[in-house]
Amino acid sequence: MIFFWWSVGSLSHPTDGTGSDEKRDTKHGSTFLVGVGKADITGAVVQIPFAGYGKMNQTGTGLRQRTYARSFVFADPANITNSFIYVVLDTQSGDTAVRYGILQGLQTLGGKYGNFREHNVAVGGTHQHSGPGGWMNYLLPQIATLGFDKQTYTAIVDGALLSIQRAYDSLAPSTISVGTINIEDANINRSPYSYLANPAAERAQYSSDTDTTMTLLTFDRLSDGKTTGVLSFFSVHGTSLYNNNTLVTGDNKGVAAYLFERGATNDARFADNFVAGFSQSSVGDLSPNVLGPFCEDTGLPCDFKTSTCNGRAEFCQARGPYFNEGDNGAKSAFEIGRRQYNAAFQLYGQISSGSGVLLAGESAVASYHTYQNMSGYEFISPFNGRLLSTCYAALGSSFGGGTSDGPGAFDFTQNNTSPNPFWRLVRGGLHQPEPEQIKCQSPKQILFDLGAMNNPYAWAPDIVDIQALRLGQLLVIVSPSEITTMSGRRWKATIAGAAQSVLSISDPIVVLASPADSYAHYVTTEEEYTVQRYEGASTLYGPNQLAAYVNLSLAYLPYLGVPNAVAQLPKLPEGPRPPVTTNYSLAFVPGVALDSPPFGHSFGDVLSSSTPYFYMVGDYVSATFVGANPRNDLRLEKTYAAVEMNIDGIWEVVRTDADWNLVFEWKQRNVLLGTSQVTLTWHIEDSYYLSGWGNALQRGIYRLHYYGESKNAFGTISSFEGVGPEFSLQI
């Protein structure tokens, strides 16, 4: 047990723990070693159910945008062993198995990478819900993705390692500046009824029930003044694309990064290989579907308390800014990403003009990490000094109701504390919770008593990562759970207040990164927990989980101090290690048997194409080819699709499948024969989609190009290509 209590008055501060620019402004910033790197982590784009919504029938059929790992390496020039890595993955979350694979890979690389271990590697996800699953460590999320997919898992781990290597190789003396900006139109609170359960006096300190603040870090190389990268923290779910979308993307944060990196290619202020990381923050109750939740059958608003329509959850769907497009949320995802990019780019300009705060401090680079078993953890509340305890992990009935971003099925609803007798029977067939567990989790009506479900292996984590990072006066709390708005405010304000006395930081800047390292579902305030909407039902360890997390952050805060002070502290306990299930996880998606072209055709033959020869901006041009299963080769760092332009008789690539408007779709025609087809569609960008891009479209002759790999009956994989007919673009 850790008995640690702070009486922190800063809970009342409406600044979210960020302080004021005037106080934080410094004339001279510290010099840091900073490196940035990016690599492809796109897994299997077909036949694997997506991670996030928990729908087995949301199975990949193609690719709209490649997904990436973006890594940031920080080190103290005076002692390079004082360093850490922060990785942003275009995935649903960080994960125990993925982080373990990255750590093992770093040790295998050895040499200069040997210093990176548990204490100084943080792995976060953008929380997109539009990518292949099968890579997560615990059984519950694996069930919805038909088990473990080694190919996708390996792509994520290997891509993350490659991005780290690229980041390390680019290490250079740099300054780090930070600034904030409010984005009022990129998120809404999807559980305002829960938020209203928080004390009125506390709510009155804030102007909104959403966290609208984006914090941006800029990294400027001292040798030439160029910006090598930016890293932002902003809270919004990666659920712009609905649960009927089956094309892989990075969702809105993937779009934001894509737009910033694309725009930087023709801007002299930015270095080559510039990287833009759009990290997640207090995401728990914040939706990108800013028009709010409506009933699909009647068009009326959903019930405020339960997010239902006539008592059922499945017809309640929140709407993004372009929901009328009927494109499964694609344009809304682009728009919410565009809003984040526009704000980040505006803020970058302000920071470049001198309004930012330079990071500085005696403890320039520091980090800590430990593992904590959350089952029955006893501690002193950091909020009121009471002796509290967490519970064994459990999910409540409202978990089954889903959210207005992705409604659930059956008869589950939010704000539900009484499951019907049928679901009580189902629960009993899995594991009947003990009376102590029922009391501990109250008022949650337990649907899945996960802490006691270990057959055939653990269904959910009972051991979580406790981690924080420091760059000068900036502190990054790394959370394994999705944090609601008010939970994040309390956590940041408490740490900011304690840092002033414990770390002697006069005005600390505190941000949250989540969900990172592992995936431990949600954390709400104690008051929000009593409402038992989706977020409260998904708070695994009971009503005291937030207080426990904050207690642990406070307990280990001294380990972010100056090196001489840290050297006097007891050795930080490693804690009990969580299980890593990659070697024995269940897998139910069969591999590729074989590919065959239809009679009279060869792989890559054009089966059909758009009929006009002349096209204008805003038009769609497509071609369908004799295809093969893209799982034969993920084509990492390459492409399945390209748009080529004829420039002086040479076909030059002007778009790849990393570009939002070029879509790759695969369809199996005959399972037994292994026949399939691929359709490439280019939505020719108008000014809206070209915003911020220096490479405007040009009049000329274009064509679509398909790259594939086929597998014969003997298992041999062969490459092939298909080229569509030429067409003319009129500007």
Image (cartoon, rainbow, N blue to C red):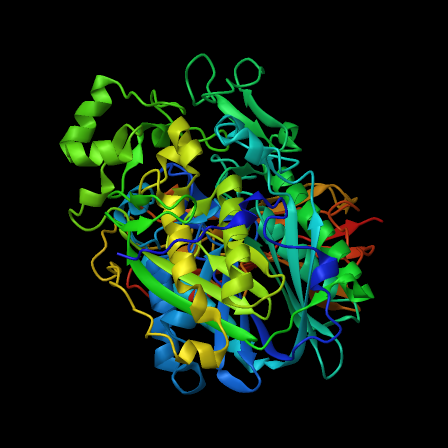
Which residue is more in the foreground, 579 or 295?
A: 579
Look at 65% across and 51% down and name the residue there: 214
Measured as percent of width and height from the top left, residue 188 is found at 60, 34
Relative to 504, say whether 414 is above or below.
above
Measured as percent of width and height from the top left, residue 29 is found at 69, 75
Relative to 167, say whether 241 is above or below.
above
Which residue is more in the foreground, 172 or 6?
A: 6
Relative to 365, say whether 264 is above or below.
above
Q: Is there any visible trace of residue 91 in the rendered image?
A: yes
Look at 38% across and 66% down and name the residue there: 369
State the quadrant of the N terminus: bottom left
- Seen from this angle, which residue lies furthest right? 731
**In this image, 223 relative to 90: left or right?**
right
Q: Tell me the quarter of the picture where residue 722 sits.
A: bottom right
Q: Is there any visible trace of residue 158 in the rendered image?
A: no
**In this image, 315 relative to 255: left or right?**
left
Which residue is more in the foreground, 388 or 312?
A: 388
Measured as percent of width and height from the top left, residue 276 is found at 63, 62
Measured as percent of width and height from the top left, residue 731 is found at 85, 49
Picture mark count = 0
**In this image, 410 relative to 294: left or right?**
left
Which residue is more in the foreground, 521 or 707?
A: 521
Look at 17% across and 47% down and name the residue there: 454
Q: Tell me the quarter of the picture where residue 572 sits.
A: bottom left
